[in-house]
Image (tube, rainbow, N blue to C red):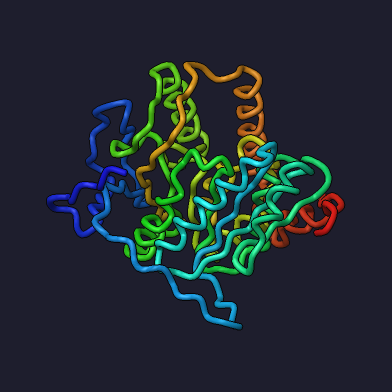
Amino acid sequence: MTAYPQGSSTGQFGVEPVSSSTPLTSTEGLEAATDSAVLEVRGSSTQPKPPVAAVSGLELEPRISVIVPAYREGSRIVPNLIRLTQALQQTGSTWEVIVVVDGDPATWAAATTCRSPQVRVLGYSRNRGKGFALRYGISQARGPLVTFIDSDMEIGPEEIGRMAGLLELYQADVVVGSKRHPLSEVHYPWPRRVQSLSYQVLVRLLFQVRVRDTQTGLKMFRREVADRVVDAALVKRFAFDLELLVLANHFGYRRIIEAPIRIDYQFESTTNLRAVFAVLWDTAAIYYRLHLLRWYDRAEPRGRARLVDELPAPLSGD
């Protein structure tokens, strides 16, 4: 992977705050003023640390919990998990992987061959959607840093260690992998850029969440932030990423960092219209619950309780 360049005046990791005087100079940036101190990551000069040595007979508490929602991966899940665990070994931190199989027996059968003290495989018998799988995985996490990544590993898992370093260095609440960061390595056709830009403008207007890419499947949260938002979150499928960021911002966790990523995938020129409608529907539902129903502000949020109530029967052997 191409090394990240050293910033000339922005510190060790080159993080540059988006100030109130930042002009809107391009559609790639959308760098608007913000009181919530959204930061733009310009790169990292850190080197991977040696892998943590295994301690015989002792299971170390993880520092990083990685949630991997999985559906229709089949046997492909095995090399993907191997790549993920190799990347986590290079972080120099203790870690755990929680694979959540979302109602797919074939993927379940393959994923269970990867079980170890550091790799847990959970699953249930009925497909409930990526958002549900992520909420369930987050509820099972033990580490103080909670991240999630798509099971296809098209987003390089090697970024997880850098994101953990950035979160700790800048005392951030959330680190968001962003396709639209200038240092990201992504083949992103212009029609898709326009679609993404339009959606992010809508998100800013509705929620004042100043993040340029809410939908990329790699994010990291402090444990207290993850616990707080999963207690209230409800989206099961398409706009779960947005709901997490909206809730973090709403509950006062506003120090957000955008980080560059590398994606090994060739995007189509347009998005399926049905998927677009589903995302917009979920987005409207989040707005309704936040601003009209004020469901998220209830003294006793029911998100985690609903998660337990709606959890299907476990897959065989779980």
Look at the picture and state if 88 lies above or below 93.
Answer: above
Residue at horizontal 40 percent and vertical 61 percent from the top: 90
Of residue 8 and residue 231, the one placed in the foreground of this image is 8
Q: Is residue 14 left or right of residue 225?
A: left
State whether residue 29 appears in this view: yes
Residue at horizontal 45 percent and vertical 25 percent from the top: 266
Q: Position of residue 64 (x, y in %)?
A: 51, 64
Q: Position of residue 171 (x, y in %)?
A: 37, 64
**Identity of the residue furthest to the bottom in this view:** 57
For the N terminus, the quadrant is: top left
Residue at horizontal 54 percent and vertical 71 percent from the top: 62
State whether residue 295 appears in this view: no
For the C terminus, the quadrant is: bottom right
Q: Is residue 49 left or right of residue 23?
A: right
Q: Position of residue 267 (x, y in %)?
A: 47, 24
Q: Position of residue 14 (x, y in %)?
A: 23, 52
Of residue 214 and residue 2, the one placed in the foreground of this image is 2
**Quadrant in which residue 53 is drawn:** bottom left
Look at the picture and state if 142 lies above or below 284.
Answer: below
